[in-house]
Amino acid sequence: MEFKHLGGWQRPLVLASTLLLVYILYGETLTTQWRQFRSASSIALDTRWKKITGLFGNDDFYLYVCGIILSIQIPFWSGGLLFMFLDYYNWPRWTRKYKLQPGTHEPVDLNRLKETIKVVLINQWSVSVPLLVFSYFLKKITKTMPVFDELPSLQRFFIDFIIFIIVDEIGLYYVHRLMHHPKLYARVHKKHHEWPAPIAITFVYSTRIEFILNMIPVVLGPMLTNPHLFTLWAWYAFVHLRGLKNHSGYDIPGLTSSEEHNYHHMTSNACFSRSPVLDWLHGTDKGFRAYMARKELEKKKNE
């Protein structure tokens, strides 16, 4: 009987039995080869890492401050320029079918784009960099500088990353809701909502107060675990690429949906988190779920 004709419970049973048989026959050999591979790859990666740290003169100031700046600026402006090109030239045309708000920014207004770039650069260089330099000297005083000699184990890397994501998710939800309080919204958060149909770089388009508040959940996880420097670089690159994606205005195939945050910019009263968990828990996604149901119904009618 062919594998594809097996019943729903039979396939996992056959697969598990096969894997068990392979392990019994070849388990010791495979384990030895896996350990040898891990050892060889670890040596190769550590050698490359040492070459990278050597480019910074193995100086902890350049590695921490300049390294983090590069881990933010390179991904942010590489992705940001790509999305600006798409929104200004509307090319290639096939990307239009992934627009979450069709008809907006076709093309994007150049004057608004220039103003947005200006605000983003001010936030990145007059707020972020001085705070980064301050944090460097604080870490030197408190003797909590990240280790950078050898790369962290894969296990430590993923544990740190999971902690960062959880802490950031919880912190962002409540900070974001706080900024929507009537007494704070106009002074702190309204600027960010000047783009009801956001473009990628509006991720950092905000008042300076909001920019600092948004940084708190991002840096809180690393403050708790004091990770390896490479993990810090990877985290800040991830945060900015995720922010670009969530504000891009596109539903990019293969990635998590940007629908929730796009809806937040449309309405300003729902979807305050990056994932649906806390919005579901607090009931701040009801309007979004109704919106998606209407959207799905319209899609079926047009098919």
Image (tube, helix red, strand yellow):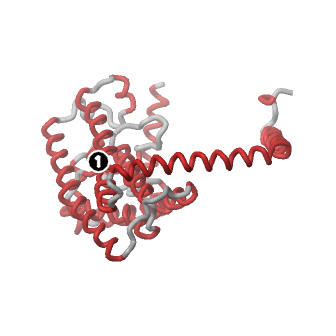
Q: Quarter-wise, where is residue 230 in the image?
A: bottom left
Residue sitting at the far top: 93
Q: Quarter-wise, where is residue 168 in the image?
A: bottom left
Task: Check the image and report above or below for 296 versus 167.
Answer: above
What count of labels does the image hold? Answer: 1
User: Where does the N terminus fall, quadrant-wise?
Assistant: top right
Residue at 28% in and 66% down: 181
Asked whether, in this view, residue 56 is left or right of residue 154, the answer is left
Task: Check the image and report above or below for 229 versus 32.
Answer: below
Residue 9 visible in this rendered orientation of the protein: no
Counting other residues with Cα less than 10 Å from the Cα at mark 1, is it few (<14), some (14-19), or many (20 or more)? some
Asked whether, in this view, residue 257 is left or right of residue 188, the answer is right
Residue at 34% in and 62% down: 60
Residue sitting at the far bottom: 142
Q: Position of residue 128 (x, y in %)?
A: 25, 59
Q: Position of residue 302 (x, y in %)?
A: 45, 26
Residue 7 visible in this rendered orientation of the protein: yes
Q: Position of residue 187 (x, y in %)?
A: 18, 63
Q: Nearer the viewer, residue 260 or 91?
A: 91
Residue at 77% in and 29% down: 4
Asked whether, in this view, residue 109 is left or right of residue 98, the answer is left
Residue at 21% in and 63% down: 130
Q: Nearer the viewer, residue 74 or 40?
A: 40
Q: Nearer the viewer, residue 297 or 148?
A: 148
Q: Position of residue 110 (x, y in %)?
A: 15, 35
Secondary structure of the residue carrying numbered label 1:
helix
Task: Check the image and report above or below for 121 versus 86.
Answer: below
Looking at the picture, which amino acid does disc 1 mark? Gln
Q: Quarter-wise, where is residue 135 in the image?
A: bottom left
Residue ID for mark 1: 73
